[in-house]
Image (cartoon, rainbow, N blue to C red):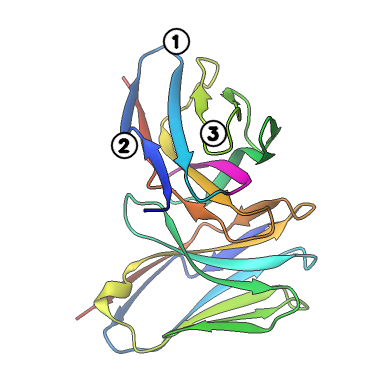
Amino acid sequence: KQEVTQIPAALSVPEGENLVLNCSFTDSAIYNLQWFRQDPGKGLTSLLLIQSSQREQTSGRLNASLDKSSGRSTLYIAASQPGDSATYLCASLSGGYNKLIFGAGTRLAVHP
Amino acid sequence: DGGITQSPKYLFRKEGQNVTLSCEQNLNHDAMYWYRQDPGQGLRLIYYSQIVNDFQKGDIAEGYSVSREKKESFPLTVTSAQKNPTAFYLCASSLNYQETQYFGPGTRLLVL
């Protein structure tokens, strides 16, 4: 059974720092790995999707990497801003490739 | 405006009562999903549907029921058999099960 873990659970950084959020998964037979952002009391917004055949995806200041052999994905945020404050969740498409398995998320606070 | 909507934003349930959460999408997506989110936890899959008139149980289907009579609608009923229904409920849709999921704004269910 796939399990997805995110470390750290919470992170507080000053504005301008580059930071890395970690996601690990137990079953390397994934179809894709997705990163989402969730603001308090809101739904999820898709940030990046990495197919199992890819190593990384980039969107603006965000870069996500995938290493299936080690069961890890990282989300890199460059030059963090207060507007980046949110919870970031990763999810793997597993279980016969028909459902997402979510981590518990990393709660990020970027202070001015 | 294309998107996915959920109503109501807040819902209160009395003891022994069934309540229905609405989810509508105009993205022409085939697949739709219902998730439950508890504080500090990731999302857990309740039910999903890959096509009209078909749906499958997720990881925590007990005490819930769904229908998929129209492509754009996937209502979730929380029955009286669900003994701990207080949670944040999120609906999502995707073109198919392999593609990015798009989320609605969520419904917060509280028990009176």
Q: Secondary structure at mark 2?
A: loop
Q: Give the residue type that dot 2 points to.
A: Lys
Q: Give the residue type that dot 3 points to.
A: Phe
Query: Is A44 or A6 nearer to us in this picture?
Result: A44
State how far apart marks 3 and 1 are (Cα): 23 Å
Q: Residue at x 49, y 43 (%)?
A: B91
| Residue where numbered disc 2 is placed | B9
Question: Marks 3 and 2: in contact by CB < 8 Å?
Answer: no
Residue that sits furthest to the top in the current view: B16
Q: Nearer the viewer, mark 3 or mark 1?
A: 3
Instruction: Tell me the subunit letter for badge 1.
Output: B
Q: Determine which of the numbered discs, if any, sits on residue B74 in the image.
A: 3
Q: Secondary structure at mark 1?
A: loop
| Residue where numbered disc 1 is placed | B16
Q: Secondary structure at mark 3?
A: loop
Q: Crowding near pointer 3: few (<14 within 10 Å), some, many (20+)?
A: many
State how far apart marks 1 and 2 are (Cα): 21 Å
**Could you tell me residue A19's position as x and y percent?**
43, 84
Which portion, as a residue range, is magenta? B29-38
**Left or right: A10 in relation to A26:** left
Question: Marks 2 and 1: in contact by CB < 8 Å?
Answer: no
Say if the magenta span includes residue A96: no
Instruction: Tell me the subunit letter for badge 2.
Output: B
Q: On the rendered image, what quadrant is the C terminus of chain B found in?
A: top left
